[in-house]
Image (cartoon, rainbow, N blue to C red):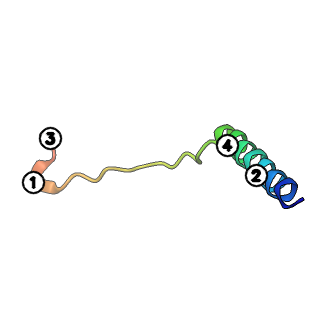
């Protein structure tokens, strides 16, 4: 009887992992602007 509970727990963990993998694969990171500041001595002339 305990093996049925263990099997159900393993199946739930596998389904949760698959669900998180699918959800994580659909997310995209927010785009952030990056501004580069040139020091005065390296400014092109």
**Camera-side residue of 29 and 17:** 17
Q: Quadrant of residue 22?
A: top right
Residue 14 placement, left or right of 3: left
Residue 35 placement, left or right of 15: left
Quadrant in which the C terminus appears: top left
**Camera-side residue of 5 and 27:** 5
**Camera-side residue of 37 and 44:** 37
- For label 4, the residue is 21
> In the image, what residue occupies the spot 47% across and 48% down?
33
* Sequence order check, earlier mark of 4 and 1: 4
Q: CA distance from mark 3 to mark 2?
A: 62 Å
Identify the mark at residue 10; answer none if there is no mark. 2
Q: Quadrant of residue 41?
A: bottom left
- For label 3, the residue is 44
Identify the mark at residue 41; answer none if there is no mark. 1
Q: Secondary structure at mark 3?
A: loop
Badge 1: few (under 14), some or many (20 or more) residues near its Cα, within 10 Å?
Answer: few
Q: CA distance from mark 4 to mark 2?
A: 16 Å
For the residues labelled 3 and 4, say whether their Cβ atoms are less than 8 Å apart.
no
> In the image, what residue occupies the spot 86% across and 58% down?
5
Percent coordinates x, y for residue 25 in the rendering: 65, 38
Q: CA distance from mark 4 to mark 1?
A: 48 Å
């Amino acid at each position: 009887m305990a093996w049925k509970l263990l099997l159900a727990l393993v199946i739930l963990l596998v389904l949760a992992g698959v669900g998180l993998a699918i959800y994580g694969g659909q997310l995209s990171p927010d785009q952030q602007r990056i501004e580069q500041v040139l020091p005065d001595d390296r400014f092109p002339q």
